């Protein structure tokens, strides 16, 4: 049936958001991937959507993976789910304990992609055969029903939910990640045939860039709430702390990549975006004071997307600027803060920016209706 995703579903349960994202990226080409950050979140998800196999971390914030496995095996609805423990531990006694509880396998971190996918494939084949033997007709009916419901969920919603952690902690930024992601998409499409950018904005790279864009502020998870959620302007000392979020974002992504032992293509852009989106064309930005073409293209696009959103959005200490004033500001900073050609692309697509801002901002943040007056 057209439109139905018939791939097997893998549930990843891990409290590290970056690990969950990396495993989703690794597996999503072959499997449909669901994620949960805790045992309770996993069981909430299981009430709505039953996977085919579970990748389960042992160390979780609210319980252990052993507790989750035990509960799965005690429930008739989930008893037959294959469970593979995902852990940094390499203790024979711990492995034996998991197998006694009903797990089918262990995979240790850093994960080897070929080993993980081979084990998933083998256990999924075994589960499929068992399911078909138990009740082939009921199995097929359940799968069709579940896949039909799943088509309503876009994969990008999952990625945004996992990666827009700064938005979740900062009430004032609202849908910042969603807006900036769409702004970057508009700029990339405008510049894809430009002589300076065509080789770096091919279709595959544009897709990865848009996928990576919500990660640009992931470093804010390391900023204290007293600073991130302060209802007013920051002091010089607080601003110095805030300026560390590009390094924290890049380093968090790098540590997760190192732990898994996997090179994920879109993470190259994600690390660029997280680390360099506050660099400025004339070298006045941070953290390195890069200038001109030394700034990655991805970060040059995000620089305008991020500034447009920051100026047009309401904050506790300011009102959102009307669209026209934001355009005037960005125009004035052409060749100072922003790549001149990226600025020109923004000026050609400013109406699209305004439409995106109007669509994704809460009602009290919506740009002025007089924006073009």
Image: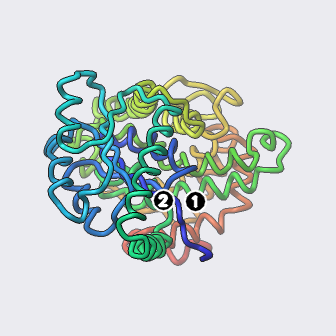
Label 2: which residue?
A: 178
* Residue 166 shows in the view: no
Whether residue 361 is situated above or below residue 191 in the rendered picture: below
Image coordinates for residue 146, horizontal then vertical, percent? 42, 72
Residue positioned 62% across, 73% down in the render: 372
Whether residue 121 is situated above or below residue 238 in the rendered picture: below
* Residue 360 shows in the view: yes
Q: Distance between the Cα atoms at labels 1 and 2?
A: 6 Å
Image coordinates for residue 319, horizontal then vertical, percent? 39, 62
In terms of depth relative to the viewer, which is nearer, 191 or 129?
129
Image position of 153 (left or right of 318):
right
Label 1: which residue?
A: 182
Image coordinates for residue 241, horizontal then vertical, percent? 32, 30
Neighbour tally class for label 1: few under 14, some 14-19, many 20 plus, Cα within 10 Å: many
For mark 1, give the secondary structure.
helix
Residue positioned 70% across, 39% down in the render: 335
Whether residue 64 is situated above or below residue 133 in the rendered picture: above
Residues at marks 1 and 2 touching, judged by CB atoms closer than 8 Å: yes
In terms of depth relative to the viewer, which is nearer, 143 or 327?
143
How is this picture coloured? Answer: rainbow
């Amino acid at each position: 049936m057209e439109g139905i995703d018939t791939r097997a579903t893998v549930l990843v349960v891990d409290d590290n958001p970056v690990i969950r994202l990396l495993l989703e990226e690794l597996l999503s080409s072959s499997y449909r991937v669901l994620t949960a950050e805790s045992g309770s979140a996993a069981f909430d998800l299981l009430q709505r959507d039953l996977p085919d196999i579970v990748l389960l971390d042992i160390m979780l914030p609210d319980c252990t993976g052993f507790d989750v496995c035990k509960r799965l095996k005690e429930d008739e609805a989930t008893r037959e789910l294959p469970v593979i423990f995902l852990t940094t531990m390499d203790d024979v006694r711990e492995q034996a304990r998991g197998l006694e509880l009903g797990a089918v396998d262990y995979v240790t971190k850093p994960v080897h992609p070929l080993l993980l996918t081979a084990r998933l494939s083998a256990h999924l084949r075994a589960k499929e055969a068992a399911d078909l033997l138990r009740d082939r007709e009921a199995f097929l009916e359940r799968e069709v029903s579940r896949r039909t419901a799943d088509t309503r969920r876009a994969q990008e919603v999952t990625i945004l939910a996992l990666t827009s952690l700064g938005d979740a902690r900062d009430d004032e930024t609202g849908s910042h990640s969603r807006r900036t992601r769409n702004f970057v998409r508009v700029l990339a499409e405008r510049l894809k045939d430009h002589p300076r950018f065509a080789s770096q904005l091919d279709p595959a790279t544009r897709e990865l860039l848009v996928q990576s864009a919500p990660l640009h502020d992931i470093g804010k998870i390391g900023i204290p709430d007293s600073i991130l959620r302060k209802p007013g302007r920051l002091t010089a000392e607080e601003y110095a702390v805030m300026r560390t979020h590009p390094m924290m974002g890049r380093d968090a992504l790098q540590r997760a990549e190192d732990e898994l032992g996997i090179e994920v293509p879109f993470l190259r852009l994600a690390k660029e975006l997280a680390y360099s989106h506050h660099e400025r064309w004339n070298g006045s930005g941070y953290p390195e004071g890069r200038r001109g073409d030394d700034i990655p293209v991805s970060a040059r696009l995000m620089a305008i997307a991020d500034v447009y959103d920051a100026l047009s959005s309401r904050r506790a200490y300011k009102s959102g600027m009307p669209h026209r004033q934001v355009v005037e500001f960005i125009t004035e900073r052409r060749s100072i803060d922003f790549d001149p050609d990226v600025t020109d692309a923004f000026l050609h697509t400013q109406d699209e920016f305004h439409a995106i801002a109007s669509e994704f901002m809460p009602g009290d943040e919506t740009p002025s209706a007089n924006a073009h007056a």
